[in-house]
Image (cartoon, grey):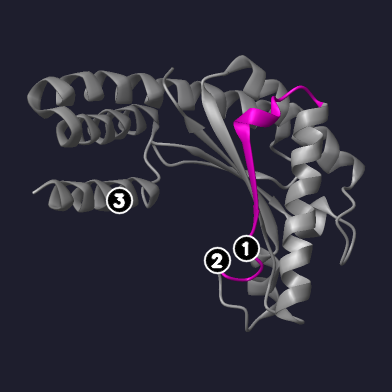
Amino acid sequence: MKRAAILGLAALAGLAACTSSTGPNRVARGAAVGAATGGVTAGPVGAAVGGTFGALVGRELEAQQRELQQSICGHGATITNTGAMLVVVFPAGITFDSSSSDLTPQAAKDIAAVSASLANYPNSRVRVIGHTDNTGATAYNQRLSERRAQAVTNILIASGTAPSRIETFGFAYKQPVAPNDTPEGRALNRRVEIVIIPTGQ
């Protein structure tokens, strides 16, 4: 029974990620995810508490999304609010020099702005994930994705984000968001994501 509920929660989270609704619906989705989480762990009382937590998370994510839109949008980064987390995507083409982990000056400023926003919303953890396309050797792409993710993490830390909040990963070309058989698709796949996940603490 618990396994079925958890699978249902995963499906609900996936639905939220595919939705491009306005703010109130994102808050409602946060409440629904929170209620499902609470229901799995503690029955009706847990569902009620989880729903309240989820609504708070939804509102906080919306506020942080607006803040980030004001500070970094217009420079090429994108911000997606899934209802459970924020995903900030920095395309490699505007973030790094070609085949390098050296950040462009504008990207460094934008990542520092993300760090400033994280200071305003301290109850979250952060995952920095580097991705490449499938051009070249697997080992090379793995190292490049790791170096680029670490370069972003270094700026976050230098700008004041506590290292204990951050996990850093490189996935090479294992998690594409577009086909790698066109130049446009490969460009979309070369990216670093900053994933902001509220903890509610």
User: Within 10 angstroms of label 1, few (less than 14), some, or many (20 or more) residues?
Assistant: some
Q: Nearer the viewer, residue 22 or 82?
A: 82
Looking at the rendered structure, the secondary structure element under dot 3 is helix
Q: Which residue is mark 2?
A: 175
> Which structural element holds mark 1?
loop
Q: Earlier in the sequence, mark 1 or mark 3?
A: 3
Q: As rendered, which of 68 and 128 lies closer to the eye?
A: 128
- Residue drawn at 74 percent across, 71 percent down: 141
| Residue 173 magenta | yes
Magenta part of the chain:
159-175
Please tell me whether mark 1 or mark 3 is closer to you in this view.
1
Does the residue at mark 1 contact the one at mark 2 (Cβ under 8 Å)? yes
Q: Position of residue 19 (x, y in %)?
A: 36, 47
Figure quadrant of residue 88 = top right
Q: Position of residue 163 (x, y in %)?
A: 70, 30
Expressed as whole percent of the image width and height from the top left, the position of residue 72 reads 72, 34
Q: Dot 3 corresponds to which residue?
A: 15
Question: Label 2 is placed on what type of residue?
Answer: Gln
Q: CA distance from mark 2 to mark 3?
A: 19 Å
Write the residue at 89% across / 47% down: 104
The tag on residue 171 is: 1
Report, in whole angstroms, how far the alpha carbon at label 1 lies from the one at label 2: 7 Å
Residue type at mark 1: give it.
Answer: Phe
- Secondary structure found at label 2: loop
Of the two numbered discs 1 and 2 in the rendering, the one whose residue sits closer to the viewer: 1
In the picture, the disc for residue 151 is: none
Q: Position of residue 182 (x, y in %)?
A: 65, 81
| Residue in view at x 90 percent, y 52 percent | 102
Q: Is residue 100 above or below residue 13?
A: below
